[in-house]
Image (tube, rainbow, N blue to C red):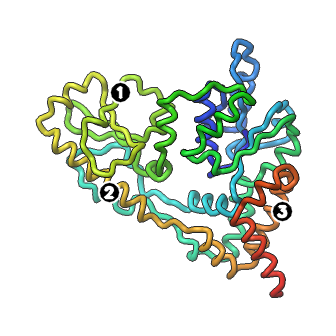
Amino acid sequence: VIAGHSIGFSATLAMLYMCGAINDWGYVSAKNHYEKDFNMLIDQNCTQMKFISITEALNINDKYLSLIKAQKALILTRDPISHLLSWFKHTHTVFKSKISTLNIEDDLFIYDDIVKRTRLDEKDGKYFTNFIYKDATPALFFRNDVMLKLSPLECFCLKFEDIAPKNIVNTFSKLKDKLKLQPIDKKNKEMIESYKYATEYGYFLPVNLIVCESYSLYIATKESFYFPAHSTKVEVTELFEFTNKPTNLMIFVEQDHIHLLHNDKNFSKVNIYLQKFIDMMEQKVKSLYTPNEQELFDFLRQYKEAVVAIKDVLDKELFFMKKMFPNIVASWKYYQEFEKMCKELDSNI
């Protein structure tokens, strides 16, 4: 699996996992990545399809890539302008603190200004040019080099839209036979299709809500709860009544403590506090500054050096894509607008 950041990498590995494949899930050092991959590949007792992930988290080098004999490559792609914007948002979002434990007596004002995001117009062309070359390129734009060195026998290219929650199950159903995957079960399908704001909810979740000395509630999204082992917890979401509850939010309690929840005389107080927490979280997520592509174009028109930097990087990065998947490149709305803007700027010199 070849993918940069902010392109659906985690969602894809989660889907492969749910389809019975073995993959090297996790962001680890290059050394640990190699050891993990080596042990996975030499395991002769495992008959499942095995996937190695090549991402920005791995210090990609010729020696590592020379050890990989890729039969098939699953390449994740995204309109590079949207991709770049998403990376800016990710790297310019700052947490004041991460609240992992909450008491039912706590005032939710503790979440004020817990997360902030730098505005595009707070930066200039020199800063953004440096951001392109030193930050975005190693994190996002390295697939052309990898493909030239790997030369896989067969390539499958997924667009960002293909792995959207409403499409990803259908996408992998089509790839099932080609990649020797198992069909996904109904429970996982429903969980995936309810995916919403998972990244943004990650600013607030998971959180352990202490109700009293005897028990606490664990609040998480379905996606974040999927991988860790929480075998001692049971879901109790349906016991509560909410207005506009996020479909992918779940509430758990330790199995040994469920009777305490059922018999809690202050149950209504717990329900009210949970509703206030959900309302606060939704309001914070929706009000968080989120620049769009048009705002990025307006910014770039002021700083030609940043435009030149982006074009320089993308001309190299998209070489194999334009050769192997020209229809996908042609479908990228914002990249086509960027190319048009480059021509307009050149004509005005």
Q: Where in the figure is residue 296, as x and y percent of width and height?
A: 63, 72
Residue 26 appears left or right of 46: left
Residue closest to the far bottom = 348
> Counting other residues with Cα less than 10 Å from the Cα at mark 1, is it few (<14), some (14-19), or many (20 or more)?
some
Q: Which mark is residue 315?
A: 3
Q: CA distance from mark 3 to mark 1?
A: 50 Å
Using the image as rendered, state which of residue 333 and residue 12 is in the foreground: 333
Q: Which residue is mark 1?
A: 233
As shown in the figure, which amino acid type bears the numbered disc 3?
A: Asp
Task: Identify residue type, mark 2.
Answer: Met
Q: Secondary structure at mark 1?
A: strand
Q: Residues within 10 Å of mark 2 (few under 14, many from 20)?
A: some
Residue displayed at 22% across by 44% down: 271
- Asked whether the beta carbons under mark 1 and mark 2 sit within 8 Å of each other, the answer is no
Q: Nearer the viewer, residue 131 or 5?
A: 5
Query: SS class of the residue under badge 3?
Result: helix
Task: Using the numbered discs, state the Cα–Cα distance from disc 1 to disc 2 in whole angstroms.
Answer: 25 Å
Residue located beneath label 2 in the image: 280
